[in-house]
């Protein structure tokens, strides 16, 4: 795979409510075809970074006050989430965010409305989602609100896939899930990356699992990148081992 940069975040600052400086100059690059992990503890700024990229920051009274975010060289700061989807970027929010009263399949179909190619091949896309998430096929007629946390996470990712994205921003996919399910979700992320060429940028507190599946990682502390490198190098780094992998 050619190592082209798909997304470039340059020295961004994010301010909430005009006073809280959550990001203090964050820079990162996301290569096309990779799985990039943003790591760090509670409140480090992982979600904020993803929301700054996808412009979901506005609905939380936050704004990017400095820096730029380039997608294929174009500044995307201020683009609406819907415009971004047509550019090829979609975010799966933390906490799943399914439409609880709709069935699993209806949830998936809501993701098809902004297809980029206009082919209208919704049935084929649904089939693709069910291939990766066989469990969702079994549960397709169930009301999403009554499915398990793992199934809701799958539905949220499946819904994002329905727009045929080039890049998926995934916020804390492991949150609230049993270890075995976390592993399952990451296996599917890996397969989507390998087989469908989807680029992933994910925020994750679970450093251990993230560094096993990611290609590259960035570690945030208090709104700054304090370390970056290949996942392999980070796994072997003594500080990462001590402070993030819990094995000094
Ligand atoms: P977590 O895993 O807990 O979500 P995180 O690394 O994703 O952690 P962020 O949610 O990005 O961290 O938070 C970064 C900082 O911004 C924190 O200090 C947090 O309190 C603050 N913050 C986040 N959202 C808001 C908001 N809507 N309004 C004000 N401050 C916020």
Image (cartoon, grey):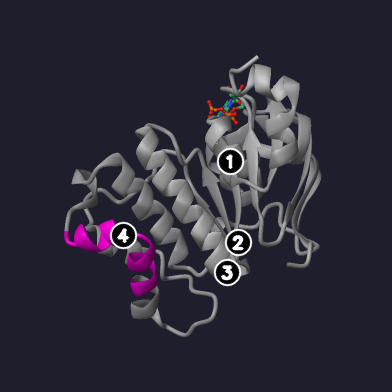
Residue 105 sits inside the magenta stretch: no
Q: Quadrant of ligand 1?
A: top right
Q: Which of the 4 image quarters holds residue 89?
A: bottom right
Mark drawn on residue 162:
none
Determine which residue is flagged by label 3: 86
Majority SS type along the magenta span: helix
Question: From what the image shows, is residue 152 above or below residue 178?
Answer: below
Q: Are marks 3 and 2 in contact (CB under 8 Å)?
A: yes
> Circle 2 is placed at which residue position?
84
Between circles 3 and 1, the one closer to the viewer is 1
Residue at the image point whose x is 43% and y is 67% from the top: 162
Q: Which residue is mark 1?
A: 212
Indicate yes or no: mark 1 CB to ligand 1 under 8 Å.
Answer: no
Residue at the spot x=39%, y=44% of the render? Answer: 96
Of circles 2 and 1, the one toward us is 1
Mark nearer the N terminus (2 vs 4): 2
The residue wearing badge 4 is 107
Q: Quadrant of residue 83?
A: bottom right
What is the CA distance from the residue labelled 2 to the residue labelled 4? 20 Å
Residue 14 in view, yes or no: no
Dot 4 crowding, Cα within 10 Å, few <14, some 14–19, many 20+: many
Q: Earlier in the sequence, mark 1 or mark 4?
A: 4
> Is 60 in front, or is 143?
143
Q: Position of residue 66 (x, y in %)?
A: 80, 39
Q: Residues within 10 Å of mark 1 (few under 14, many from 20)?
A: few
Asked if labels 4 and 1 touch by Cβ distance under 8 angstroms, the answer is no
- Contact between marks 2 and 1 (CB within 8 A): the answer is no
For the magenta stretch, what is the residue range?
127-141
The Cα atoms of the two marked residues, 3 and 2, are separated by 5 Å
Q: Earlier in the sequence, mark 3 or mark 1?
A: 3
For label 2, the SS is helix
């Amino acid at each position: 795979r050619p190592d082209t940069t798909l997304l470039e975040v340059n020295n961004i600052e994010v301010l909430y409510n005009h006073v809280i400086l959550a990001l203090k100059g964050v820079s990162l690059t996301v290569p096309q075809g990779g799985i990039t992990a943003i790591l760090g503890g509670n409140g480090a700024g992982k979600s904020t970074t993803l929301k700054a990229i996808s412009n979901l920051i506005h609905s939380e009274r936050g704004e990017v006050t400095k820096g730029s975010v380039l997608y294929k060289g174009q500044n995307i700061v201020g683009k609406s989430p819907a415009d971004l989807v047509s550019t090829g970027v979609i975010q799966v929010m933390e906490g799943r965010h399914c439409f609880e009263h709709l069935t699993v399949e209806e949830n998936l179909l809501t993701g098809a409305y902004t297809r980029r190619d206009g082919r209208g091949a919704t049935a084929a896309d649904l089939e693709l989602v069910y291939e990766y998430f066989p469990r969702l096929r079994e549960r397709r007629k169930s009301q999403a609100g009554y499915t398990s946390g793992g199934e809701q996470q799958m539905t949220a990712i499946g819904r994002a896939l329905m727009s045929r994205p080039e890049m998926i921003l995934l916020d804390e996919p492991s949150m609230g899930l049993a270890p075995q399910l976390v592993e399952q979700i990451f296996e599917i992320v890996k397969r989507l990356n390998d087989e469908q060429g989807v680029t992933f940028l994910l925020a994750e507190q679970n450093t251990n699992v993230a560094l096993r599946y990611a290609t590259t990682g960035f570690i945030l502390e208090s709104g700054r990148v304090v370390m970056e490198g290949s996942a392999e190098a980070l796994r072997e780094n003594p500080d990462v081992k001590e402070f993030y992998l819990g094995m000094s």
